[in-house]
Image (cartoon, rainbow, N blue to C red):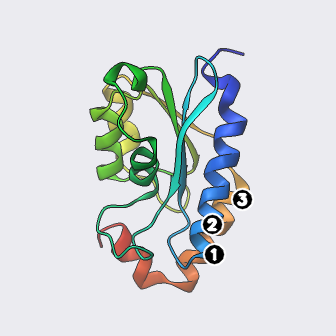
Amino acid sequence: MDSASRWDQLGMDIAREEAFLSYEEGGVPIGGCLIDFRDGIVLGRGHNLRYQKDSATLHGEISTLENCGRLPASVYRHTTMYTTLSPCDMCTGAIIMYGIPRCVIGEHDNFKSPGEVYLESRGHQVVVVDDKRCKELMKQFILERPQDWDEDIGE
């Protein structure tokens, strides 16, 4: 197992915990986690807070980056972003902007962003783990709150 994937279980577990927390708070159930893959240090974790904080931008990945605080650019070059759902264009842009080389995605059946292909075209590694729990939670949210889901993805 390479150093980048050694922490994948931990990263996805944290991202899932964050997604469930967002759902329990009345938010969109998308969670994230950023781990330094050299030593497994969790630099930040977060979840979608658009409804909880009346925010236009606090998607799960953005919330995760916010909770990391300010980091030197060199730190991001050794990290993996874990997210429960395929990152939207905004979150894809943040991953590219900070030079995060690897993105592990819980699922992309409920929503598959063109960002996955764009990340790969820019040299970032994308791994989709096809997590059943991520799929079920997102599907449940979309069925319960279709208008809120459409708003979250800009439709």
Furthest-front residue in this view: 70
For residue 131, side relative to residue 45 (left or right): right
* Horizontal and vertical percent position of residue 134: 65, 58
- Helix, strand, or loop for circle 3? helix
**Rendered-image quadrant of the C terminus:** bottom left
User: In the rendered structure, which amino acid carries the disc numbered 1?
Assistant: Glu
What residue is pinned by disc 1? 24
- Helix, strand, or loop for circle 2? helix
Rendered position, 80 above or below 82:
above
Residue plotted at (36% across, 22% down): 123
Residue plotted at (34% across, 27% down): 99
- Helix, strand, or loop for circle 1? helix
* Horizontal and vertical percent position of residue 53: 39, 73
For residue 134, side relative to residue 62 (left or right): right
Q: Which mark is residue 133?
A: 3
* Horizontal and vertical percent position of residue 121: 32, 28
What residue is pinned by disc 2? 21
Of tags 2 and 3, which is closer to the observer? 2
Front one among 112 and 39: 39
For label 3, the crowd category at 10 Å Cα-Cα, with few meaning under 14, some 14 to 19 and many 20 or more, is some
Rendered position, 8 above or below 57:
above
